[in-house]
Amino acid sequence: MTETRSYPPEPASVTKARLFVLEALSSHTEDITDRAEVMVSELATNALRHTGTSFTVTVTVTVTHIRVEVSDAGAGRPEKRSPSALETSGRGLQIVEALSDHWEVVPAHPSGKTVLFELQLSAAAS
């Protein structure tokens, strides 16, 4: 199953993207949905905050894994940071790395990028 939704560049879109992912994964365990919810919220916030463009969220569920992609048309490539304890932001990709089984940034052509994460499933978990 693959589902995609597009969102305008406004703060309410982060909540809508999070709810979309929760709905798409409603048959999965709370651990899976909680992790996916936090990560898509981080990635949607990054897309909105750093690009100011609309963005799309794609959820793909197979027997073995869940893949969530957040794509935008903004320039630049997100970089995982190591902010100091006093900095109030910059931990989003650290969170994605900690909660996912795999994540990466894929450039889009002619511009933009997709940041994605995957969560592995056992056949019994889905």
Image (spheres, helix red, strand yellow):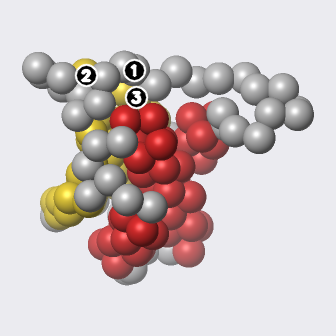
Q: Is residue 118 visible?
A: no
SS assignment at label 3: strand
Q: Is residue 90 left or right of residue 8?
A: right
The residue beneath circle 2 is 107
Residue 77, numbered label: 1
Kindly identify the amino acid type of the residue bearing the numbered disc 3. Answer: Glu
Kindly identify the amino acid type of the residue bearing the numbered disc 1. Answer: Arg
Give the mark toward the camera: 3 or 2: 2
Write the residue at 39% across / 20% down. Answer: 77
SS assignment at label 1: loop
SS assignment at label 2: strand
93 shown above or below 123: above
Q: Residues within 10 Å of mark 1 (few under 14, many from 20)?
A: few
**Residue 67 x %, y %:** 32, 49
Kindly identify the amino acid type of the residue bearing the numbered disc 2. Answer: Pro
Q: Is residue 69 left or right of residue 2?
A: right
Disc 3, disc 1: CB below 8 Å? no
**Residue 18 x %, y %:** 43, 67
Write the residue at 26% across / 60% down. Answer: 7
**Residue 107 x %, y %:** 25, 22
- Residue 113 is drawn in which quadrant? top left
**Residue 34 x %, y %:** 57, 67
Disc 3 from disc 1: Cα separation: 11 Å
Disc 3 from disc 2: Cα separation: 10 Å
Residue 38, numbered label: none
Disc 2, disc 1: CB below 8 Å? yes
Decide which of tag 2 and tag 1 comes sooner along the chain: 1
The residue beneath circle 3 is 104
